[in-house]
Amino acid sequence: MSDVASPPIAAHRSRAVPRLLIGLGVVLTLAFVAMPVAVIFAQALSKGLAVYRANVLAPDTLHAIYLTVVIAVVVVPVNMLFGLAAAWLITRFAFPGRKLLVTLIELPFSISPIVAGVIYLLLYGAQGLLGPFLEAHDIRIMFALPGMMLVTLFVTSPFVARELIPLMQVQGADQEEAAVTLGASGWQTFWRVTLPNIRWALLYGAVLCTARAIGEFGAVSVVSGNVRGETNTLPLHVELLYHDYNAVGAFAAATTLTLIALVTLVLKALLERRLERR
Amino acid sequence: MAIAIKGIEKRFADAPVLRGIDLTIADGELVALLGASGSGKTTLLRILAGLEWPQAGSVTVDGRDWLALEAQRRRVGFVFQHYALFQHMSVRDNVAFGLTVRPRASRPPKGEIRARVEALLDLVEIGHLANRFPAQLSGGQRQRVALARALAIEPKVLLLDEPFGALDARIRKDLRRWLRELHDRLGMTTIFVTHDQDEAFELADRVVIMSDGRIEQAGTPDEIYDHPASPFVARFLGGVNELPAELAAGRLVVPGADAGAVTPPAGTDGTATLFVRPHEIDLVADSRAPARIRNMLTSGPSIRYDVDLPGLATPVEVELPREAARLRNLRRGDAVRLRLLRGRVFSAHGAPLPPAAPSPERHRILEAAL
Ligand SMILES: Nc1ncnc2c1ncn2[C@@H]1O[C@H](COP(=O)(O)OP(=O)(O)OP(=O)(O)O)[C@@H](O)[C@H]1O
Ligand SMILES: [Mg+2]
């Protein structure tokens, strides 16, 4: 359709409306995304670079970073394995209860993280269902690293499976069947055919999972016990510093989180481009 | 390898897809599976390849219980309906796959694999595409890669699911001949699925016609064409007139037509249906006859007539060679008598009656016609 052929009013509107919407989008993005991020850095650096450095390198902050990374390093691979297994089961086999399993995998998304934390507390806490048993065997899950890992696992468990299931459904089992008729074992088929075909989606899911594992606040705050320098992850640490009226410290810690988020964003964008190319 | 299929039954969640398939295939035979969409052709191939298991029945290959063997160990070359090429591998790696996944003991050395892949790519005439990826190939080229990949494992049994489905008519014809030569040269047992009747008849030693999970008929192209076992097969082959007939005291009576040349089947009196192909009917001008020529169509070497027969909803199609038509000198609206030279009679409920053989009179009529 050319401008000449279309009636003048339509032509006028067709240019004005997109412009308005684009303008609105830009303003909102600036107000709600760019400005807060800018404020984080401005506040963190408001007392100069040296103070910023000292705050980031404070032992408690470093420990919080360390703890956050440890949790992510454990949780993400476990979730990749879980997501792969679940997606494979759901897309390659027909069994009763398949739909139910899909719903179950999505469940953590619809449960508030705080509630997830409380569920774990009710299960593994001292007064919880398994509390006496755990105490008798001297196993400490709540208010310690294992509990924090468990809730993070719970909260992030759908990410990988959710990326893989639709992709593997579309791809179908054709290529795997071809591999088997050509004499490949199950293992060879997985490594040489299944995995290469889903690797970008798998990585994409892993990136989303990492971002969430690092940023998780609600669920972890319920089960962590907030012991400074021991069970504080970065998001919890930021909150703690803020409540201590240490704004610069809080924002300095927040910049590390923000940087991680930005790196994740870039990775995500790159992976999305890869995924679209396929 | 000789394949014996016995009593195969397959259901998907209670929906029967194969309802008792019996078929024996000789070593080195080229068999076509022909049938309507959804008749179970792919399912049967998948069972032979080990991708699906039947609920009942047996498959024996060279005396060996085939169903006890995993797909991985059957060494069946399978060309999928939608190619199923490995998207992330080059053409070369696709073809080499079956060799590279062999256990170390039986895996050929790298150099030999390379040489064999080159040879196969040349065989299917796509040597120049070795480094491309499947997404960069045309449908026909993908087809050839799929074939080369299946041949790489030196299969004794080759299963092809609509191998030429994606190709245009001319290339199909070329590839048919080419596949036949390949089959003869490599000496495999080959089963291929097709929707295309011409393809099945031209290419195969034996054609198996399937319908709704059953084998309607299996036989050489000539057997099936000349002696269809059921009204279904006769209809399936297409281009056939169905005339209501009466069997009485060993005589076949077709209202409005002269069926003297058709040898009636023995026994069973009653109503029947006569299946006649357009070129098996002759037309004779006869002003007292009830049939009228409704339409005439020239189609190259022959003339087609649509003839209205009283009591028949659809006109009878008749095809005369151009020379015979000239001698008859018939026009639209002329009254004609139908002389049936040949035909196949089925009783009203479709029970196959002994096929009607050509009678001596037919030859006389044919001679007269030409
Ligand atoms: N995995 C499956 N689950 C359920 N039903 C199936 C499955 N595979 C095939 N069917 C059904 O079995 C019937 C036969 O399918 P099949 O693919 O063997 O047909 P076909 O003869 O190859 O048809 P086409 O010519 O269209 O390829 C169809 O009705 C199909 O819907
Ligand atoms: Mg099919």
Image (tube, coloured by chain):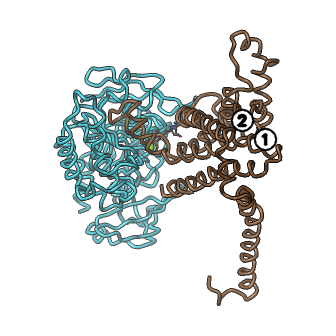
Chain colours: A brown, B cyan
Mark 2 and mark 1 residues within 8 Å of each other at the beta carbon:
yes
Does A259 sit above or below residue B232? below
Provide the chain ID for the residue under circle 1.
Answer: A
Report whether mark 2 lies on the same chain as mark 1: yes
Q: CA distance from mark 2 to mark 1?
A: 9 Å
Q: Residue furthest front?
A: A50
Find numbered disc 2 in the image and state the secondary structure of the residue it sits on. Answer: loop
The numbered mark, 2 or 1, whose residue comes first in the sequence reads 2
Label 2 environment density (alpha carbons within 10 Å; few <14, some 14–19, many ≥20) = many
At a point 33% along the width and 72% down the height, the residue shown is: B329
- The image quadrant of residue B2 is top left
Residue found farthest to the top: A136
Q: Is residue B71 among what the camera can see? A: yes
Circle 1: element type: helix
Most foreground residue, B222 or B206: B206
Residue at the image position 22 percent from the left and 55 percent from the top: B127
Left-right relation of A154 to B200? right
Residue at x 77% of width, y 65% of height:
A31
Tell me the tag on residue A232: 2
Q: Quarter for ligand 2? A: top left
Residue named by callout 1: A240
Other-residue count near label 1 (Cα within 10 Å), few / some / many at <14 / 14–19 / ≥20: some
- Relative image position of residue A53 (x, y in whole percent): 65, 51
In the displayed structure, would residue A128 be above or below residue B255? above
Of B39 and B134, nearer the camera is B134
